[in-house]
Amino acid sequence: MALDLNLKELQVWFVTGSQHLYGEEALRQVEEDAQKVAQSLNDVAEIPVSIVYKPVLTTSDSIRRLMAEANADEQCIGLMMWMHTFSPARMWIAGLNLLNKPYLHFHTQYYRDIPWAEIDMDYMNLHQSAHGDREFGFINTRMRKNRKVVVGHWQDPEALQEVATWTRVAAAWHDGQGAKIARFGDNMRDVAVTEGNKVAAQIQFGYEVNAYSLGELLPHIEAATEGQINALLEEYEASYTLTDRVREGGAKREALRESARIEVGLRSFLKEGGFKGFTTNFEDLIGLKQLPGLAVQRVMNEGYGFGAEGDWKTAALLRAMKVMNVGLRGGTSFMEDYVYHLDPAGSRILGAHMLEVCESIAADKPVLDVQALDIGGKDNPARLIFTAPAGPAVCASLIDLGNRFRMIVNKVDVVTPPADLPKLPVARVLWDPKPNLKVAAESWILAGGAHHSVFSQALTAEYVEDYCEMAGIEYVLIDEDTEVRKLKQDLRLGEVYYHIAKGL
């Protein structure tokens, strides 16, 4: 079951700039053209949100009022701006200073081609996005504004895909404002990379992180009824391939019932508190009979963010990428780099976790079983076992460097394991990192990337880059063009830039 979120209920406002210099007839044409462009964008299947036309803006006062309205509108997740004609940029200063929502600058023009035989000065004056958008671009750069710039005709598939990507990221950004992430217990003891400054994160990203004791979760688990538990068991049997030991009458059936009880309670706690993500910690299981595994996998599949060992940054990032993923093919999951295959003929990474990998990335129907965990000192937990399908993917890691946040993304190619893994009772993914394991791993480590990440076969690196632009954080990409020497230089320059930028 995917995240139950109707993105079409969210709005991106289509805003067109012009001025009164050209006369009322020209402005009527600008209005007509802008309405057609907005309607066309709204009809594009790949754009999941509603594109809402707004009247052409020609004065500083009208711009400022519209920006104030956008800030206050709960359905508006961002703006798309286009200068049909020249629109003097000083008119935009007050409005841009006021705006607190993300925006995309669409550098397009109404007609794709120049009408060589008919073009005259009237045409030139009316269709001058080529320099109208440059004027607008200057004032944004002068004001140090983060925004997405898309160049191309408004019917060009490549440009439309860029717009569609940005709207999904804007939806995720909107979803994250005020989002609540629950930590059951604290961070895994002595671990550094999964920690961070929660206050700084709330200022930077908009979500809030708070700790809850298992004593607050246990009443929800204890309140689970036999009817609720039995209904979940029936759902398990319909959705997964159960091993003999967890089927009715099997030796581990009671352990599966306990997993269902934990799932009922976890769902109740998350729903009652309005949470969008959570973390667990196998070092803090007081009152639980087993580490939540199956329950975490299943609620993750419904859109909740998750991070193991108290990793709240990954939990929040996973939720954001789950929102971006809505309606797209492929899944998105919590992930961990676990084991290397260091064969010189093909070095690879086996990604997995103790239990908590989302079934959205499963190639086939998952197997449901209860197996030994050998960590946490509790009863053996239930879990889903599967392998991810081959294809392109990304791994994204958000880290706290003390003075700023950094996002590291590695492009990877998932491959089918060359042999079965009959004794490995966890969900897993085998991938080739780009450009190769040696360069990718060295680059990831130099950049400070965590062992936890968000893995996605639905999203590309562009989604994460757009998210970083909205958040105003550093973005490091490791791909087929990465060279370690150049990466080191970029990281050093980033240190200087972000130190200086905080003082601008």
Image (spheres, rainbow, N blue to C red):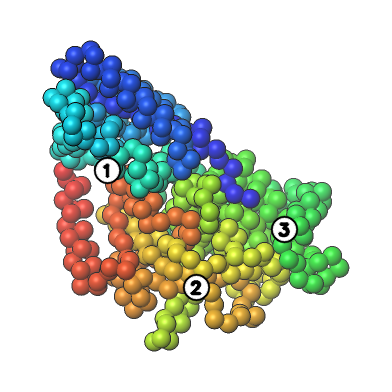
CA distance separating discs 3 and 2: 25 Å
Tell me what residue is drawn at x 54 percent, y 77 percent: 417
Residue 151 circle label: 1
CA distance separating discs 3 and 1: 45 Å
Of the pair 211 and 236, the residue shown nearer to us: 236
Location of mark 3 (residue)? 239
Residue 174 circle label: none
In the rendered view, does 290 fall on the left or right side of 234? Answer: left
Q: Is residue 483 above or below residue 285?
A: below
Based on the displayed image, in which of its 4 quarters is residue 396 positioned? Answer: bottom left
Q: Nearer the viewer, mark 3 or mark 1?
A: 1
Contact between labelled residues 1 and 2, with CB atoms less than 8 Å apart: no
**Location of residue 100 in the rendering, given as x and y in whole percent from the top left corner:** 32, 33
Q: Residue furthest right?
A: 249
Which mark sits nearer the N-terminus, 3 or 1? 1
Question: Given the image, on which type of amino acid does mark 2 rest?
Answer: Val
In the rendered view, does 104 fall on the left or right side of 8? Answer: left
CA distance separating discs 2 and 1: 34 Å
Q: Is residue 70 above or below residue 386?
A: above
Question: Given the image, on which type of amino acid does mark 3 rest?
Answer: Ser
Residue 415 circle label: 2
**Location of residue 23 in the rendering, given as x and y in whole percent from the top left corner:** 19, 14
Q: Nearer the viewer, mark 2 or mark 1?
A: 1
Mark 3 burial class by Cα count in 10 Å: few <14, some 14-19, many 20+: few
Tell me what residue is drawn at x 67 percent, y 75 percent: 372
Which mark sits nearer the N-terminus, 2 or 1? 1
Mark 2 burial class by Cα count in 10 Å: few <14, some 14-19, many 20+: some
